[in-house]
Image (cartoon, rainbow, N blue to C red):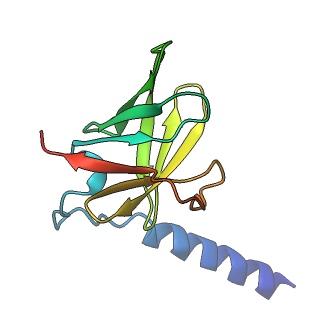
Amino acid sequence: MKKVVIAILVTLFVGSLLGCQNHDSVSAPQTPETMAQQFQGVIPCADCQGIKVSLSLQQGGRYTLNEFYLGSDNVQTTTQGRWTRTAEKLVLISDQGEKRYFRPLDNGLEMMDTEGNPIESVNSYRLASVKS
């Protein structure tokens, strides 16, 4: 029993020492989270003529999402928060904790549903990249 406990303690000690190594000696390439990007498009709306969407991904991981509801009411909403990219998705997390998902597609983004799955529709949910 003592040998098992000693083996576990030695393994944990060696593992913690390996975790302390400094890997900053080689500079990493710039990640997508540090590059500013702009996207725009008009997506479908159930009770208006469409929603003009403008998404600004800022350096440092912040975003601003403007949605302008086209039609007689001309309602506009602005959401801000943090963004991150996984291998397959762009995840927006608002300052209120709400999540929105997009996926890279061609030279832009495609909006995904609230679970992060593709939207099955004949309508376009795409935002095109805008040159700054």
Residue 45, relative to residue 114: is it above or below? above
Task: Identify the residue at horizontal 29%, vertical 65% (top origin).
Answer: 106
Q: Residue at x 87, y 85 (%)?
A: 1
Please provide percent x and percent y for residue 30. 19, 57
Q: Which quadrant: the C terminus? A: top left
Q: Point out residue 25 in the picture as x, y percentages from the top left corner.
A: 18, 65
At x 28% / y 55%, what residue is drawn? 32
- Image side of residue 9 versus residue 130, left or right: right
The foreground one among 87 and 22 is 87
Q: Quadrant of residue 42?
A: top left
Name the residue: 52% across, 67% down: 16
Quadrant location of residue 48? top right
Q: In the shown orientation, is residue 48 left or right of residue 5?
A: left
Report whether residue 78 is seen.
no
The answer to whether residue 35 is above or below residue 74 is below
Residue 131, x across and y down, in percent = 13, 44
